[in-house]
Amino acid sequence: MNWILFVARRFAHVDRTGRSAVTGFLASLSICFGVMTLIVVVSVMNGFQLSFIDSIMEISSAHIRVEVQPGFDEAAFNSFCAEPGNGIRAAVPFYEAQSLAAGDTGQQSPALIRAVPPEICRLDSGFAREVNMISGRFLIASPDTIVLGSGLARQLGVRVGSSVNLLALSGGSDVDLISDNRVFTVTGIFSCGYADINSTYAFISLEAGRKMFGAEAREWYGIKLEDSNQDMRVMQYLEEQVPGISTESWRSYNRSFFGALRIEKNLLMMLVLLIFVVVGVNIFNGMRRMVFERREEIAVLSALGGLKKNVQLIFIIRGLVIGLSGAVPGLIFGLLMCINMETIFMVLSKVSFGIQYFFTMLTDAGSVVFLRENPMYQVYARIPARMLPFEVLCITVFGVFSSLTASWTASRNIQSLSIAEVLHDE
C-alpha cells in the first residue's frame, strides 16, 4: 500500500502543475457547488415543510387521536397516560364541529370550532409553542370567549374585543343547525406555520363545547408523544389496557398531505442530484484521458510486478481526493449558508432592489419613487433552514461516491491494457 500511495501522490503533484490541473480543479469545484447547493436547498425545504408538519401535529392532529366510545374507562386511560416512561408527553380532550361564523361587521366564513381545556397551554407545551398569539391572549375560561386564527379573523373582519356569531353549527339531533344566539367575544388571535389552520381554526372552552355540540358529540383525546415514531407501540398498549376507545395514528390521519410533501422533496432532490451526474461524467472523461496519457507509467509499474488492480487503485485514490477536496468545502459552505440564511435573504433583497433601482433610473427616473423592496424576501428570511444530520451526511457521502464511481469506471481500461505492446511501441 505504501508504494501505491507514493505513486498516487506523485501523479497528483504532476497533475497540479500540468495541463490536467484545470480539469481536477473544475471537478472538485463542481462537487463543492453540488454539495453546497443540495444542502441549502434541502435545508430550506425542510424549514418550509417542518413548519407545516409541526403546526399540524401540535395543533390539529396530534400523534395519536383517541375516539371515546361506549364503555370508555376514563380512570384507566388517565392512569396509563400518567405513567412515567410510557413516552406520552400530553393527553388533551377536545370536541370538534364545523361552523359558519359571522363577524359583527356581517362578514362570514366557514370555520372549524375546537373545544379544548382552558389550561391547554399549560398541559401541552407543544401546542403553546406553535400557537403564536399576535393579538390578545389565549383566554377561553369564560364560556362565551373564543380565540381565532389570524386568517379567519381577517376573513371575518374582527379583532380582539369583537363579537363572533356561530350561525350554522354541525352536531347531533339535539343541536340547532341554524341559530343567532351563539355569540362569542374574541379574546385572542393566533398565527402558526400552516396557513390552513390560521384560516379555519377557532378555539372555545371544553365546557362551551359540551353545551353547544350536544349530547351526541364525539369526544376525542389528542395524545402527544416524546417520539412520534413510537405511535404504533403506544396505540397497541392503549387498546390492550383501556377499553372503549378507537385510535388513529398521525401517519394515516395525514397520509395524503405528508405523502405529497414527501414526493415534492424527493423530486427536488432528484433534480438537484443531476449535478453530481454531470460532475461524474466530467470526472470519468478526465480520468480516461489520464489513464491514456499515463499508459507508459502503467506499463512500467506492471512490468516491475505491480498488479493491475493495484495500479487501478492509484487512479481510484485520485478520484477519492477529488471528491473529498470538493465535498468537504461544500459541506462547510453549505452549513454556513444555512446558519446565516436570514442575512443572505436580506442581502439578496438589497441587491435585487439596487439592480431594479439602477435600471429604473436609466429608463424611467420618474417611477423610482414607486419602487419597493420585494416583501417575499423577508418572508423567506423568517423561515429557518433546518439541517437534518442524516440528510447532510448522505449528500456529502454521495458527492464523494460520485467521484469514486467515475474514477473506478474510467480506470477499468487498465485491466485490458497490453503491457508488452505499450513497451514495444515506446
Image (spheres, rainbow, N blue to C red):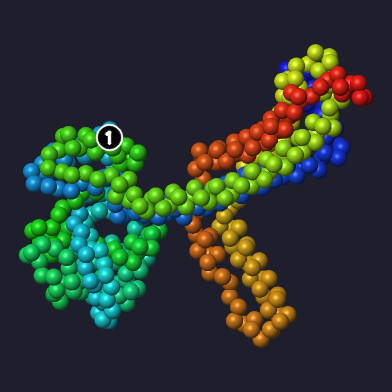
Quadrant of the rendered structure where residue 56 is?
Answer: bottom left
Q: Which residue is mark 1?
A: 233
Task: Classify the position of the C terminus by image quarter.
Answer: top right
Neighbor class of circle 1 (other Cα within 10 Å; few <14, some 14-19, many 20+) is few
Residue drawn 77% across and 38% down? 286
In the picture shown, does residue 298 fall above or below 94? Answer: above
Residue drawn 69% across and 84% down? 365
Q: Nearer the viewer, residue 392 or 384?
A: 392
17 to the left or right of 135: right
Residue drawn 18% across and 71% down? 168
Q: Nearer the viewer, residue 53 or 297?
A: 297
Residue 275 location, x and y as percent?
64, 47
The amino acid beneath tag 1 is Arg
Q: Extreme right residue here?
A: 426
172 to the left or right of 298: left
Residue drawn 66% across and 73% down? 356
Task: Classify the position of the N terminus by image quarter.
Answer: top right
Residue 38 location, x and y as percent?
58, 47
